[in-house]
């Protein structure tokens, strides 16, 4: 009986996020879709070929650095934005896709294009792509706040990065655990 109480106390100490992650990983569900035909588990070669084709179609352009791709899009608010991305690979396959969103017309005095608005707009875009279900997670003093959605192996995390940008990361959780 004492062991049962101890297990109950320990399991009740888990955060909502920890419980969600355990449940989703235990489900065995596999979600590899990213966007624009890109997928978790895609090889480097397939990534480059897909991006090359999308570039020829005018959907993607090279970013400001050698390792970034830019996708111009209209977010649900109707504001024009750019999404810069470039994946991380493990054993030659995509396991992490970091993305950075920013409004095209951002300026410090334009409140309608603030990072707070961009965060809500980015989450709305990701909900269109991946469905609803983002939860808010934060540290104790709320200095770090993120919104998270987990579907089986795929975790999507979104947070304000800068005064003018929002970062989203899509990761294959089982592969991440291998890399740690």
Image: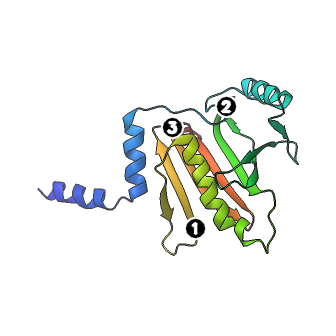
- Disc 1, disc 3: CB below 8 Å? no
Please name the residue that numbered disc 3 is placed on: 174
Image quarter where the C terminus lies is top right
Secondary structure at badge 2 equals loop
Q: Is residue 133 above or below residue 27?
A: below
In the rendering, at what x and y percent does residue 27 appear? 37, 36
Q: Which of 81/146 is in front?
A: 81
Q: Is residue 83 above or below residue 115?
A: above
Q: Which of 18/37 is in front?
A: 37
Left or right of 151? Residue 57 is right
Q: Which of 100/141 is in front?
A: 100
The single residue placed furthest to the left in the displayed view is: 1
Residue at horizontal 40 percent and vertical 32 percent from the top: 28
Can residue 180 be spotted in the picture? no
The 10 Å Cα crowd at callout 1, few under 14, some 14 to 19, many 20 or more, is few
Please name the residue that numbered disc 1 is placed on: 144
Secondary structure at badge 1 equals loop
Closer to the eye: label 3 or 2: 2
Can residue 113 be spotted in the picture? yes
* Separation (CA) of disc 1 from disc 3: 24 Å
Image quarter where the N terminus lies is bottom left
Whichever of callouts 1 and 2 sits on the residue coming sooner in the sequence is: 2
Residue at horizontal 72 percent and vertical 48 percent from the top: 74
Please name the residue that numbered disc 2 is placed on: 38
Query: What is the quadrant of residue 44 in the picture?
Result: top right
Whichever of callouts 1 and 3 sits on the residue coming sooner in the sequence is: 1
* Separation (CA) of disc 3 from disc 2: 19 Å
Secondary structure at badge 3 equals helix
Query: What is the quadrant of residue 54 in the picture?
Result: top right
In the rendering, at what x and y percent does residue 109 appear? 79, 75
Closer to the eye: label 1 or 3: 1
Left or right of 27? Residue 124 is right
């Amino acid at each position: 009986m004492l062991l049962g109480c101890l297990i109950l106390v320990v399991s009740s100490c888990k955060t909502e996020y920890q419980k969600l992650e355990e449940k989703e990983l235990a489900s065995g569900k596999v979600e590899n879709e990213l966007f624009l035909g890109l997928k978790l588990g895609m090889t480097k070669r397939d990534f480059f070929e897909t991006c090359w084709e999308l570039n020829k179609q005018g959907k993607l352009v090279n970013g400001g650095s050698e390792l970034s791709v830019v996708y111009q899009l209209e977010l649900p608010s109707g504001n024009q934005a750019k999404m810069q991305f470039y994946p991380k690979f493990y054993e030659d396959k995509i396991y992490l896709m970091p993305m950075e969103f920013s409004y095209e017309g951002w300026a410090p005095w334009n409140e309608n294009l603030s990072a707070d608005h961009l965060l809500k707009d980015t989450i709305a875009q990701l909900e269109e792509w991946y469905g609803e279900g983002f939860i808010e997670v934060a540290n104790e003093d709320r200095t770090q706040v993120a919104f998270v959605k987990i579907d089986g192996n795929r975790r999507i995390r979104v947070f304000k990065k800068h005064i003018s940008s929002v970062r989203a990361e899509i990761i294959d959780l089982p592969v991440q655990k291998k890399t740690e």
